Image: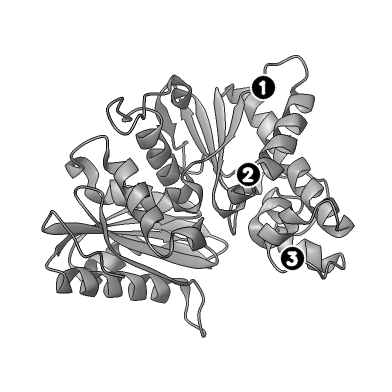
């Protein structure tokens, strides 16, 4: 889809790599999406990197046809990401191990490539719209000090998180901070794709919720969203959903006890369930924290496109002109024909 209007001659190609889909957009300096593509991560035997190449190539071609040049590429990737080298050291859902993503893309397209961890990249977008970087003059958005001490939790094909402490986005000693999905919360529990048992991701990702629903005999719902809508009428859906909330609450209560965030933001495609997820999760976390105060727990307004917006921000790096960029990108993504599908 080519946007008919543009006000800049350059774009960055933003790509959010998920275990199910690869989403991409060409975004100009104002935050306007001028081209957009989505494809299956593994399609007709194509591997994840081939899908990234396909999306990037198609977006560059579309942007060029509309009169834009490509200034760079920003990538949000799951797994253990080294932003300095642009390599993905390990991503179980993608089958990557010491994968030199940035160097391969720079050789392919001859532009600067920035690679970030998917949850930390989504956190960059969250803070740009609600926390540091938000502007009181931008469509009513204002700085929310809670985002200086926040936990951003995108839930899609996998479960991840990003930690913001004292206004600093924490990467950890090896760049592995925030691997919430692979925190083991059920002793000898369900086997996870990472090889461990009882991980949060084995119970609470969009993929595993649907998988467990089918394994337990569920037949009515055909998607995670449908499962969330059937809790009052489908006991299998209710059981699997309760297991997901319980696993998440164990991990999030533990992190809260250690890091004391002011707000926990639930994003990604599963966050589209809204209060069906947020309300029981808030109650379960509060029950586990006991005497401690419970942080604000809220649904991300960015939904499934937080990683894509963050990828656009890191793609532009210091060239993003103002604080309204992230919100304009969100508006532009929401107004396109794929907006609802991505939510």
What kind of element bears circle 3? helix
> What is the spatial separation of the Cα atoms under label 3 and label 1, in whole angstroms?
31 Å
User: Relative to the observer, which residue lies in front, 221 or 48?
Assistant: 221
Residue 57 against residue 252 in the figure, above or below: below
- Residue 323 % position (x, y): 26, 34
What kind of element bears circle 2? loop
Query: Which residue was labeled with disc 2?
Result: 274
Q: Earlier in the sequence, mark 3 or mark 1?
A: 3
Residue 162 against residue 212 in the figure, above or below: above
Query: Which residue was labeled with disc 1?
Result: 294
Q: CB atoms at circles 2 and 1 under 8 Å apart? A: no
* Label 2 environment density (alpha carbons within 10 Å; few <14, some 14–19, many ≥20): some
Query: Which residue was labeled with disc 3?
Result: 211
* Label 1 environment density (alpha carbons within 10 Å; few <14, some 14–19, many ≥20): many
- Residue 185 % position (x, y): 76, 42
> What is the spatial separation of the Cα atoms under label 3 and label 2, in whole angstroms?
21 Å
Q: CB atoms at circles 3 and 2 under 8 Å apart? A: no
Residue drawn at x 43%, y 64% is 338
Query: Which quarter of the figure has residue 111?
Result: bottom left
Residue drawn at x 71%, y 35% is 279
- Residue 113 % position (x, y): 26, 57
Q: Earlier in the sequence, mark 2 or mark 1?
A: 2
Q: Residue 54: in sight, yes or no?
A: yes
């Amino acid at each position: 889809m080519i946007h008919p209007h543009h006000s800049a001659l350059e774009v960055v190609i933003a790509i959010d790599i998920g275990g199910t889909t690869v989403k991409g957009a060409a975004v100009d300096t104002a935050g306007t999406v001028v081209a957009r593509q989505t494809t299956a991560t593994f399609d007709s035997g194509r591997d994840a990197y081939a899908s990234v190449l396909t999306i990037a190539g198609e977006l560059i071609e579309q942007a060029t046809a509309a009169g834009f040049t490509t200034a760079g590429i920003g990538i949000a990737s799951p797994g253990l990401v080294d932003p300095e080298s642009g390599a993905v050291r390990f991503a179980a859902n993608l089958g990557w191990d010491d994968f030199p993503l940035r160097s391969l893309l720079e050789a392919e397209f001859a532009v600067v490539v920035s690679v970030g961890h998917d949850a930390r990249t989504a956190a960059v977008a969250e803070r740009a719209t609600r926390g540091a970087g938000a502007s009181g003059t931008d469509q009513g958005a204002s700085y929310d000090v809670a985002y200086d001490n926040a936990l951003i939790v995108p839930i899609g094909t996998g479960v991840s998180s990003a930690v913001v402490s004292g206004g600093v986005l924490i990467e950890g000693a090896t760049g592995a901070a925030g691997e919430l999905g692979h925190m083991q919360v059920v002793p000898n529990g369900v086997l996870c794709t990472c090889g461990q048992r009882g991980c949060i991701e084995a119970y609470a990702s969009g993929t595993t919720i649907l998988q467990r629903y089918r394994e337990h005999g569920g037949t009515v719902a055909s998607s995670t969203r449908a499962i969330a809508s059937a809790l009052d009428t489908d006991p299998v859906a209710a059981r699997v959903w309760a297991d997901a909330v319980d696993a998440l609450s164990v991990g999030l209560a533990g992190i809260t006890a250690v890091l004391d965030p002011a707000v926990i933001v639930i994003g990604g495609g599963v966050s589209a369930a809204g209060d069906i997820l947020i309300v029981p999760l808030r109650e379960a976390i509060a029950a586990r924290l006991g005497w401690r105060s419970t942080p604000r727990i809220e649904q991300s307004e960015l939904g499934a496109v937080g990683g894509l917006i963050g990828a656009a921000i890191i793609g532009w790096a210091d060239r993003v002109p103002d604080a309204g960029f992230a919100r304009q990108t969100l508006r532009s993504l929401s107004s396109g024909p794929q907006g609802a599908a991505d939510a």
